[in-house]
Image (cartoon, grey):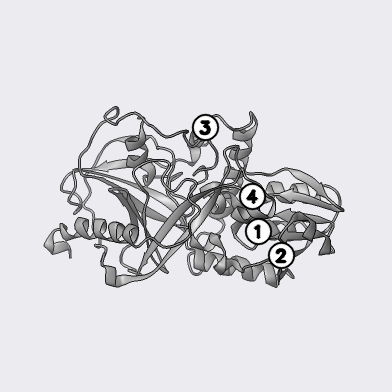
C-alpha cells in the first residue's frame, strides 16, 4: 500500500508505530488477510462541547536530520545533547536516554546535570542513576508544566523523527537501537498500578473503502521519514472487521492494537522513583549556553526539547503544532480510533481528541501555542456526527 490515505488507514492499526507525541502520524502496517467476523461490543463516545475539560497545545521539536545527540564542549562543561525527537519523545525516551547516558559517563564523571524535566530529561536522569551517577535535574518547569505532559501518549517511535533523505547513513541503525531499547523497557511498566503503560484496541474508520492510487499527488515540500520496516517483529497486525460485526456506521473498519502511555500516572511514577533514588530537581532557567557556568557539574545532558531552539540558538529545530481537546473520562471507552482526520485515545485522565489535518505537513513550522476554538469544534463535531449514527441499541 502507498499514499497518504493508506498511511491513515493503518496509522491506528495494530502495532502502532502510529500516533505520536502531541501529533499523530506514523508508518503503515502490513494488514493481515481476511475479515474478522466476531461481534464487537463498543461503547459510544459522548462527543459534546459541554464535556470538554480543557484544551492544550504543544510544539514538537522536529529536526530534518533527526534528533541531536552529539557531544560538545562549552567552557569547562562537557555537554551531551539529547533533543529534537519530533513526535517520538516519549516513545524513544529510554533508548535515547541510554545513548545519552553512555556519552555522559564515558569520561568518568559521576556527578551529572540534566537540563529539562520532560520525558527525555526524566528517563535520561533515571538511567544515569541506575548506572551509579549522582544526578540533579535543572528545569524551568516541572513535568506537568512541560510540553511532554501535553502529548497524546501513544507509542510512535518514528513520528516526525526526521525528513526523508535528510538523515546520516548511520541514523536508521541508531533509530532501531533506540526503538528496541525503549520497547523492551516499556514492557516492564505494563500491569503496574495506574496502568502507566498499557495496550489498547484501535479502529481506523473510513466512510468509503478506497484503494491505493486514488489520491492526488503529494504536494508537501518533503516527506517525514519512516523506519518501521527495520523492526518488523515489533509490528502487530491489523484486520478488517466484517460488515455487521461492529456498530460503526462506516464502509470500512480496521482494528488493531497500540501501546500507550497514561502520562499522568506514568510521569508521576517516574518522577517519584527518581526522587526516591536520591535525585534532585532544582528550578533554574538558562538563557544561553554560557549560563551553564554556574553549575558545579562538569557534565551536562541537554534534554530541553523545543526549548533548545532558543537556548542553543538552534534554528534546525522546527515546531510542529498539535492541539488536544480533552473530553471528560469515559472508563467504558477502552479503545482509540481514527475517523475523518480526527483521532481519539482513551486515557484514565480523559479522552484525547485531536484533529490531525488533511496533510502530512499539518502544524509544521507553526509557532503558536494558543488554542484554536474552531479546530476544537471541528474535532468534537466530527465525532458527534459519527456517534449520532450509532445503532440505538448500542447507545
Q: In this view, does 340 lie to the left or right of 84?
A: left
**Disc 2 to disc 4, how far (Cα)?**
15 Å
- Asked if marks 1 and 2 touch (Cβ < 8 Å), the reply is yes
Which corner quadrant of the image does residue 31 belong to? Answer: top left
Helix or strand or loop: what does disc 1 sit on?
helix
Front label number (1 vs 3): 3
Give the residue at mark 4: 83
**Disc 3 to disc 2, how far (Cα)?**
34 Å
Front label number (3 vs 2): 3
Q: Looking at the image, which residue is at 59% across and 58% down? A: 119
Residue 11 coordinates in the image, percent (x, y) = 38, 43
Q: Looking at the image, which residue is at 50% across and 43% down? A: 160
- Front residue of 70 and 131: 70
Helix or strand or loop: what does disc 4 sit on?
loop
Give the residue at mark 1: 121
**Disc 1 to disc 2, how far (Cα)?**
8 Å
Give the residue at mark 2: 137
Residue 312 coordinates in the image, percent (x, y) = 69, 51
Label located before the other in sequence (4 or 3): 4
Residue 310 coordinates in the image, percent (x, y) = 65, 54
Label located before the other in sequence (1 or 3): 1
Q: How crowded is mark 1: few (under 14 residues within 10 Å), some or many (20 or more)?
A: many
**Disc 4 to disc 1, how far (Cα)?**
9 Å
Label located before the other in sequence (1 or 2): 1
Give the residue at mark 3: 164
**Disc 1 to disc 3, how far (Cα)?**
27 Å
- Quarter of the N terminus within the rendering: top left
Which corner quadrant of the image does residue 252 belong to? Answer: top left
Q: In this view, does 73 lie to the left or right of 20?
A: right
Q: Residues within 10 Å of mark 4 (few under 14, many from 20)?
A: many
Amino acid at each position: 500500500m502507498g499514499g497518504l490515505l493508506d498511511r491513515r488507514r493503518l496509522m491506528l492499526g495494530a502495532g502502532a508505530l502510529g500516533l505520536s507525541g502531541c501529533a499523530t502520524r506514523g508508518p503503515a502496517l502490513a494488514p493481515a488477510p481476511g475479515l474478522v467476523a466476531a461481534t464487537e461490543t463498543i461503547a459510544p463516545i459522548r462527543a459534546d462541547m459541554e464535556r470538554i475539560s480543557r484544551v492544550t497545545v504543544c510544539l514538537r521539536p522536529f529536526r530534518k536530520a533527526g534528533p541531536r545527540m552529539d557531544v560538545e564542549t562549552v567552557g569547562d562543561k562537557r555537554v551531551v545533547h539529547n533533543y529534537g525527537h519530533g513526535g517520538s519523545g516519549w516513545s524513544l525516551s529510554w533508548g535515547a536516554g541510554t545513548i545519552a547516558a553512555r556519552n555522559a559517563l564515558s569520561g568518568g564523571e559521576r556527578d551529572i546535570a540534566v537540563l529539562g524535566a520532560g520525558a527525555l530529561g526524566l528517563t535520561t536522569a533515571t538511567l544515569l542513576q541506575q548506572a551509579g551517577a549522582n544526578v540533579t535535574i535543572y528545569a524551568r518547569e516541572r513535568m506537568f508544566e512541560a510540553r511532554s505532559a501535553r502529548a497524546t501518549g501513544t507509542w510512535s517511535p518514528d513520528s516526525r523523527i526526521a525528513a526523508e533523505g535528510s538523515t546520516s547513513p548511520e541514523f536508521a541503525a541508531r533509530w532501531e537501537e533506540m526503538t528496541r531499547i525503549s520497547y523492551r523497557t516499556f514492557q516492564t511498566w505494563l500491569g503496574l498500578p495506574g496502568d502507566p503503560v498499557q495496550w489498547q484496541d484501535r479502529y481506523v474508520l473510513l466512510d468509503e473503502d478506497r484503494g491505493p492510487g486514488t489520491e492526488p499527488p503529494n504536494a508537501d515540500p518533503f516527506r517525514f521519514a519512516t523506519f518501521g520496516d527495520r523492526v518488523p517483529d515489533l509490528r502487530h497486525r491489523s484486520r478488517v472487521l466484517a460488515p455487521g460485526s461492529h456498530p460503526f456506521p462506516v464502509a470500512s473498519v480496521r482494528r488493531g492494537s497500540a501501546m500507550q502511555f497514561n502520562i499522568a500516572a506514568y510521569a508521576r511514577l517516574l518522577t517519584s522513583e527518581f526522587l526516591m533514588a536520591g535525585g534532585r530537581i532544582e528550578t533554574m532557567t538558562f538563557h544561553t549556553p554560557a549560563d551553564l557556568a554556574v553549575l558545579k557539574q562538569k557534565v551536562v545532558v541537554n534534554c530541553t526539547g523545543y526549548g533548545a531552539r532558543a537556548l542553543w540558538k538552534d534554528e534546525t529545530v522546527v515546531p510542529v503544532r498539535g492541539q488536544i481537546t480533552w473530553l471528560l473520562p469515559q472508563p467504558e471507552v477502552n479503545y482509540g480510533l481514527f475517523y475523518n482526520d480526527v483521532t481519539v485515545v482513551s486515557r484514565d485522565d480523559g479522552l484525547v481528541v485531536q484533529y490531525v489535518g488533511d496533510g502530512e505537513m499539518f502544524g509544521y513550522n507553526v509557532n503558536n501555542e494558543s488554542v484554536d476554538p474552531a479546530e476544537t469544534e471541528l474535532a468534537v463535531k466530527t465525532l458527534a456526527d459519527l456517534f449520532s449514527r450509532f445503532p440505538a441499541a448500542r447507545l
